[in-house]
Image (cartoon, rainbow, N blue to C red):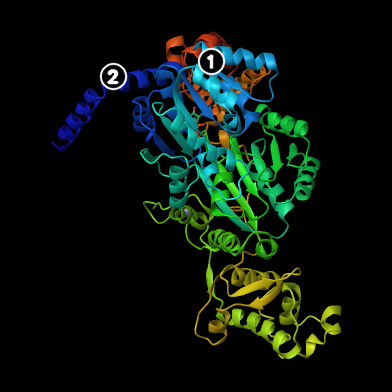
Amino acid sequence: MDGTAVMEEVSLTLVEHTDTETEALRTLTRAFGYDTFRGDQEAAIEHVAAGGDAVVLMPTGAGKSLCYQIPSLVRPGTGVVISPLIALMQDQVDALRALGVRAGFINSTQDYDEQRLVEAEFVSGELDLLYLAPERLRLESTLDLLSRGKISVFAIDEAHCVAQWGHDFRPDYLALSLLGERWPDVPRIALTATATRATHQEITKNLGMDGARHFEASFDRPNIQYRIVSKDDPKKQLLRFLKEEHAGDAGIVYCLSRNSVEKTAEFLCRNDIPAVPYHAGLDARTRALHQSRFLREEGLTVVATIAFGMGIDKPDVRFVAHLDLPKSVEGYYQETGRAGRDGLPSTAWMAYGLQDVVQQRKLIQSGEGDLAFQRRAASHLDAMLALCETVQCRRAQLLAYFGQQQESPACGNCDSCLTPPETWDGTVAAQKVLSAVVRLQRERGQKFGTGQIVDILLGRKTAKVIQFDHDQLSVFGIGQELSEAEWRGVVRQLLAQRLLAVEGEYGTLVLTEDSGAVLARQREVPLRKEPKKAPSAKGSSKGERKSKAVVDLPEELLPLFETLRTWRATQAREQGVPAYVVFPDATLKEITLTAPSTIDELGGISGVGEKKLATYGEAVLGVLAEWSAVAGARPAEEDEPPADE
Ligand code: ADP
Ligand code: ZN
């Protein structure tokens, strides 16, 4: 009975909104080849299509693009999309054209004639979508151009740029508030994948979008497995992770410095993992080339500083690895969010160790910026460290950071859930470290870094210990019960918990306000146990694993999937577009699983819209027919009966 009541309510809503809904839904099916909207997409699209302003917060891969693309198609005029990365506009536009959408862009990569052509198309109403970089809108000539055409929607992509302190694009984004003043009747939609409550409010305020409706999706990315391992030999750990779990996959490796980017990329190449570097020190041509190779080739790894990745909408990035600690949870979430936009299993992997904490704390202290800036940076770092050191579900903690709650306390797809870490009472160990620091300072007036403290605790008579007579200290050799790695783990966790601090150029250890309570036995210090040898989350495994994208296809269908991928690669090369512009992996997978034999059946597959069906339909059916002919002609292998299904 309840069920009927609910059904009635649903159908009433359907009737009420039937006009825009059918139009939006029809566009979704016809142009994009999808049957249903996801999550908040429909509500946001309806709202904007009806002329309302919207602020949309959705995690990467949730489908933000459709939220402005469909209103642009449904409303009369051209949708103007403000997006900061001009290097990606060509690909975005190519992808839309492959769907039959009339899209164009204007940016500095074009010559005068090309720009004039797009401008003319815009003015005469021949464009559904026009992409522009934010700095263009500070030019009077651009505003003039825009006033000569009809605009359906303004979409402001990567809207967190308006809020993020110190961000490159910030002044350009701040200037975007003029859009609402100059075109009060054109709806605006601001989109971002990363925002805490505070950032969310800043976006709304700075863009002058107080009247906007807010759509906030769950930030969860269930297909991403989060793992943070203890760093000992990061390059080797990375290599093992890639070989065991992501052979042949595309992914991104983030490093802090340009130098380590270069070295890591070389190291991977030497070990048969195709990799290219990307950082701001490379010239523009090399950067563009490496980015374009990443988008177009399959299975390439980009080793990069955080300069890489914003706006990269390659759907089949299978892993994001961090060799250094990101500066904030926002940064970490944004970077890891570039994995698995297609919804297939992906990994966010990070190696994290003592040096990261020391280095980041030092950077903050020695960096520019006033006290308020430093305090903010320090609290960002604290949140990041708490995530690294937690013994609880990583996902639960990430979501909590963004003000959201997970239904159950354990997600089952992070390292904490897969191999729950052990904790131990580290109070005595903490006291030993703190005592060593205190003795050095009180008795000798000296400050030293972690290495010397650990040597003292372990009772090692190194040259430096002898030189400073540290073997005469009462704390010398009182810590033989733990290994060096374990002591470093204790120091790291004390730093993370602010029970210890680093100081000066050499990162010497000093006490904090809270250290006293530990020394006075007024406070316990629970610690996370250091793993003996960082295991991979799924236990040790011999030999190379298959790429994550194909693991859940039945073994016997893998050759067909590979055949379709090869066909796709040829198409992509001929047209000079990335493979996913032809069809994404998820669509190829569904084709493999359902083996359609007619154009109609193929058209029913998610991701196959009208234009793609017309362009590739016959060819795909051809590939399938050929494959089943060959497979059928093959003598039955092993002792299996000639299986029908
Ligand atoms: P975002 O910009 O939020 O990161 P995208 O707009 O790039 O996400 O979409 C991610 C992927 O999901 C794309 O491949 C897109 O085509 C696909 N997608 C979006 N909406 C739908 C839908 N309603 N049904 C099926 N696939 C969708
Ligand atoms: Zn979990």
Residue 279 shown left or right of residue 582 in the figure: right
Position of residue 181 relative to residue 164, above or below, is: above
Q: Where the N terminus falls, by quadrant? A: top left
> What residue type is disc 1 on?
Phe
Residue 19 has which mark?
Answer: 2
Q: Which residue is mark 1?
A: 122
Closer to the eye: label 1 or 2: 1
Residue 598 shown left or right of residue 275 in the figure: left
Q: Mark 1 to mark 2: distance in Å?
A: 27 Å
- Res 266 quadrant in image: top right
Q: Residue at x 70, y 51 (%)?
A: 256
Position of residue 370 relative to residue 306, above or below, is: below
Q: Foreground residue, 290 or 644? A: 290
Position of residue 158 relative to residue 578, above or below, is: below
Q: Residue 495: x, y in percent? A: 61, 70
- Res 545 quadrant in image: top right
Q: Which residue occupies the extreme left position in the image? A: 1
Mark 1 CB lies closer than 8 A to ligand 1: no
Q: Residue at x 60, y 79 (%)?
A: 430
Q: Residues within 10 Å of mark 2 (few under 14, many from 20)?
A: few
SS for dot 1: helix
Q: Foreground residue, 111 or 551? A: 111
Q: Residue 637: x, y in percent? A: 59, 24
SS for dot 2: helix
